[in-house]
Amino acid sequence: MKKIVRGGLLLLFIAMALFFSLAPSYIDKSNNNVSTKGPFARNSWYDSIPFIADLHCDELLWDRDLLEEINYGHVDVPRMQKANMAFQAFTIVSKVPRAMNIEKNDGNSDQIALLSFAQLRPPSNWFSIKKRALNQCNMLHKFALRSEGNLRVIRSKGDLQQFISDRQQNHALTAGMLGLEGAQPLEGDLKNLDNFYEVGVRYIGLAHFYDNEWAGSAHGMNKGGLTDIGRLLVKKMDSLHIVIDLAHSSQQTIDDVFAMHDGPVLVSHTGVKGVCNNQRNLSDDHLAEIGKRNGLVGIGLWETAVCGKDAAATAKSIRYAVNKIGVDKVALGSDWDGAIEASFDVTGLPRIVSALENEGFNRTEIEMIMGGNVRDFFLRNLP
């Protein structure tokens, strides 16, 4: 009997070792695909684009070393350097429901808790949305400290100005900024906003894939608007110069924000209904209102956003948005490493440039869309 017990324990130990060593990378690889591998051709002036930027990447969710180049997923610092990419917004995914879809979800399940367990992140991450989100935020700072200056975390207008100046001398420099995908890590307490401000979060989406205590989601059960405490959150975010991200917000939430807030907003990753009509994407009326407020719209690289799987589909939606609100208010919002299949990883950004040329944009306009607009938006709006 003792031998049977010991054998059973040994098998259990082996099974657990295999699970914890193999499951996280398997989940990552199976969710963050690319349909086209590089290297990718680039035109004669691509490498002289001064500031390439993207508004939305979920890389910090996964069990990777951001400073090491890997052969799966979408973003890491070495691949950013290869792509002449200056700036990436790293967004924090803290909770998503099982069987997630764009139509209707409740918040009664939590896939990120299970992922945190599989990744052997601290036990506090398994049970607290706030702590797992702060853990991801702190990971970016740890990567920056280890990068020997090659990766910086942008918290302020001064940080960004210094980075722009330094990068003119060294194009290997990269920068990241933190955002929250949904306000659920605040756990219903406005005081928690201060914790995320201190760690460097500079934009926050009000809701993600389910309605929360702050606002309705485009994918929630009720799809309502701002709650009473959600209105207080908008006011406090404004006072701290934390930008409101309307990605994933319900139509009513977007209308409520516009009714009470006259400052800038962004939509970090989206499509437009005029090209790809689903409830995930922005209406012409909401596009127009964002344009009036000198906001910023990041167009995505995945099929639900642009009704296509290649750079041409993304460029088509960019052209539509530019025609509606102006070339200075549209940017890239890839959703890289957000459990999507992308046509290419970050090294494929030259394909976007070529597709924009095919849409009739000139070099100055392309440089704005590829990152100049992100740079200028945050120079205006960071604390």
Image (tube, rainbow, N blue to C red):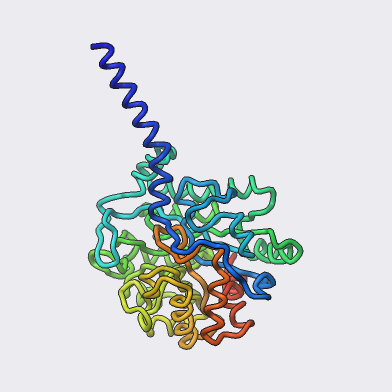
Task: Answer with left or right where residue 22 lies relative to residue 346.
Answer: left
Q: Is residue 252 visible?
A: no
Quadrant for residue 8, please give it: top left
- Numbered label tally: 0
Quadrant in which residue 117 is drawn? top left
Quadrant location, the C terminus: bottom right
Asked if 196 appears above or below 378 in the picture, the reply is: above
Residue at far top of view: 2
Apparent side of residue 132 relative to residue 66 in the rendered image (left or right)? left
Examine the rendering and report whether any part of residue 147 can be seen: yes
Horizontal and vertical percent for residue 75? 53, 57
Residue 114 or 307: which is nearer the viewer? 307
**Identity of the residue drawn at 40% across and 46% down:** 26
Q: How far from the left and from the top, in percent, is residue 45?
A: 68, 75
Q: Going 32% across and 66% down the picture, which residue do you hit?
A: 217
Q: Nearer the viewer, residue 243 or 83?
A: 83
Q: Residue at x 53, y 47 (%)?
A: 138
Residue shown at the point (48%, 84%) measured from the top left: 319
Location of residue 37 with respect to 362 vertically, above or below: above
- Left or right: residue 174 versus residue 285 is right
Percent across and percent down for residue 343 are 45, 66
Work out which residue is located at the far right of the displayed protein and give it: 169
Question: Residue 1 appears at what percent x and percent y?
Answer: 23, 11
Q: Is residue 189 left or right of residue 88?
A: left
